[in-house]
Image (spheres, helix red, strand yellow):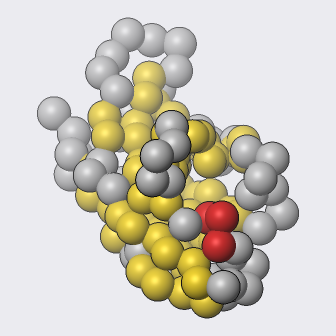
């Protein structure tokens, strides 16, 4: 069983930066991708970015050019560098780990709050 724990959220002014971390309690298989999702109050949870074990990444259009996702396999940790933050980036950010092309469980963290003030 893998447990994911997010950290690094907080309050920041518009235009500022934050770095989120997602630490896994156990080793994440190379067959697993990892991703960041976010959910604003009253809205659905949306995908923000994903990264594979070999570093291939995808981004939602809303964060392209501002956010950078990365993964340190040796530390079982994933990061989300968020720059040029906007008030609309305010949400609870969740990390997850999901199997790619294989059977397996999907794991979720408990979330970390990011609030961007205007």
Q: Which residue is pictured at 47% across the width and 84% down the height? A: 11
From the image, which quarter does the C terminus lie in?
A: bottom right
From the image, which quarter does the N terminus lie in?
A: top left
Q: Which residue is pictured at 26% across the width and 52% down the height? A: 110
Left or right of residue 95, residue 48 in this image = right
The foreground one among 37 and 86 is 86
Residue 43 image offset from top left, x and y in percent? 51, 43
Within the image, what quadrant is residue 99 found in?
Answer: top left
Q: Which residue is pictured at 49% across the width and 60% down the height? A: 91
Residue 55 image offset from top left, x and y in percent? 65, 47
* Furthest residue in direction left, as rendered: 1
* Furthest residue in direction front, as rendered: 42
Q: Is residue 81 visible?
A: yes
Q: Is residue 2 above or below residue 40?
A: above
The foreground one among 103 and 63 is 63
The foreground one among 33 and 43 is 43
Q: Is residue 74 visible?
A: no
Left or right of residue 44, residue 10 in this image = left
The foreground one among 87 and 61 is 87
Q: Which residue is pictured at 55% across the width and 66% down the height? A: 90
Residue 105 image offset from top left, x and y in percent? 30, 21
Within the image, what quadrant is residue 86 found in?
Answer: bottom right
Q: Is residue 110 above or below residue 44?
A: below
Q: Count the marks: how many?
A: 0
């Amino acid at each position: 069983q893998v447990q994911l724990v997010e950290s690094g959220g907080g309050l920041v002014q518009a235009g500022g930066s934050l770095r989120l971390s997602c630490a896994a309690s156990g080793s994440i298989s190379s067959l697993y991708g990892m991703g960041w999702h976010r959910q604003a109050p009253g809205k659905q949870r949306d995908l923000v970015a994903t990264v594979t074990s070999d570093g291939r990444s995808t981004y939602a259009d809303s964060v392209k050019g501002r956010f950078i996702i990365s993964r340190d396999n040796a530390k079982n940790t994933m990061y989300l560098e968020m720059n040029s933050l906007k008030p609309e980036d305010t949400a609870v950010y969740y990390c997850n780990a999901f199997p790619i092309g294989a059977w397996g469980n999907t794991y979720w963290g408990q979330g970390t709050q990011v609030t961007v003030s205007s």
